[in-house]
Amino acid sequence: MAQISFEHVSKTYPGGKAAALTDFNLTIKDGEFLVLVGPSGCGKTTALRMIAGLEEISGGTLKINDRIANDLAPRDRDIAMVFQSYALYPHLTVADNIAFGLRVRGAKPDVIEKKVRETAELLELTEFLERKPARLSGGQRQRVAMGRALVRAPNAFLMDEPLSNLDARLRGQMRAEIARLQRLSAITTVYVTHDQVEAMTMGHRVAVMNRGTLQQLDTPRQLYDRPANMFVASFIGSPPINFMEGTLVAHQGGAALSCGPLLLPLGSHAQRLSAREGSKIIVGIRPEHLKVAPSGAGPGTLSARAAFVEDLGATLLLHLDQHGITIGHANMVDDDRDLMSIAPKLKALVDSAARVVRDDNVHL
Ligand code: ATP
């Protein structure tokens, strides 16, 4: 079991234009499932490879169980890594692939046999033990790769986009499977992805990264409801959050946001923001916090045309032609559908649950 800490860690690759990691601080708790998420090139893989001992650290300290690990050889860390490509041995059977790490460490044959059997049962691979990887599906290969890592109960698991080669259905299944296995084994797991759905559904906590820095470390729910800045607000959530810029004005004893023709009530934030009258702020509103209202609805409404509509089944997404706003409308009733087809001029009613997010420039 392991607790892993990055303390002021930096990384500059030789010849690299920008630092891959800058003053990176993060503590992964013992037994935790932590997801590193962020756009391509933000430094996720670099951080993961540092934990494995595969990447030199330019500055700062990496600790594994309070022991400085900057220069610890990979084999002395007892950490298992699962790659995107699975890295299975094609000439070995599933059983031999799973057993490989134990054999290399000189485990006794009867111990190997028992552990391979137990691991195969856990991963529902028993019937495939004598097959070669070429005769397995993508999901089965993925499970063999997991089995290879799981069989030797390492200090920690590191996973680098392990599901990115799978189709959407299998990805959904394996997402749940990996989360289940992690809960059962309670082995510290660091999981790298650029897929925010994986991040939100799998991690106990999620570290959102951008340009080599940590933007926010929090539970999925907190990231969604209380993003620390505009980057996190826009990266987490699909369809993405709507941003509206406006000026704070006095309204019914509190503040409202004046944004073109729209006077946006600020819900629970109204009182707190009343002292900031006249300031420009940016408000973030999740698509599901906006509603379609009939024509002529009162204050807090905005007239807009639906530029295009996406029907996702359970949700209907209306993309408005003003402010780039998207409305996510769950369980749209027939009346609303009529309203859309008959009268494309829609009104977006801003729900009182509107959320205010912190602008990078304005500190709320
Ligand atoms: P992705 O999601 O695309 O895999 P990532 O978030 O994992 O990206 P890293 O692979 O950690 O990002 O890369 C971080 C930065 O460091 C990028 O700008 C990348 O171009 C750079 N980088 C990574 N490896 C090297 C290397 N060996 N030499 C030079 N620069 C590198």
Image (spheres, rainbow, N blue to C red):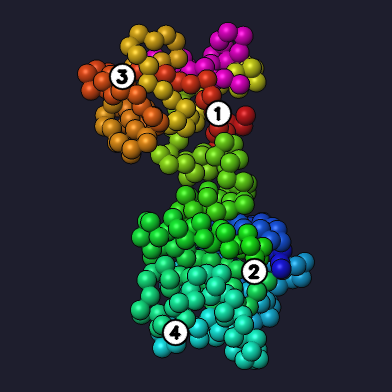
Nearest to viewer (mark 3 / mark 2): 3
Of callouts 4 and 1, the N-terminal one:
4
Q: Is 288 rendered above or below residue 170?
A: above
Would you call the spot at circle 2 few (<14 residues within 10 Å), some (14-19), or many (20 or more)? many
Residue type at numbered disc 4: Glu
Label number found at residue 130: 4
Label number found at residue 156: 2
- Point out residue 269 in the picture as x, y percentages from the top left corner: 60, 22
SS at mark 4 in the image: loop
Nearest to viewer (mark 1 / mark 2): 2
Tell me the CA gap for discs 1 and 2: 38 Å
SS at mark 1 in the image: loop
Q: Which residue is mark 3?
A: 335
- Point out residue 227 in the picture as x, y percentages from the top left corner: 57, 39
Q: Would you say the residues marked 4 and 3 are in contact, meaning their CB atoms lie under 8 Å apart?
A: no
Of callouts 4 and 3, the N-terminal one:
4
Q: Would you say the residues marked 2 and 4 are in contact, meaning their CB atoms lie under 8 Å apart?
A: no
Ligand 1 has an atom within 8 Å of the beta carbon of the residue at disc 1: no
Q: Is residue 19 visible?
A: no
- For the N terminus, the quadrant is bottom right
Of callouts 1 and 2, the N-terminal one:
2
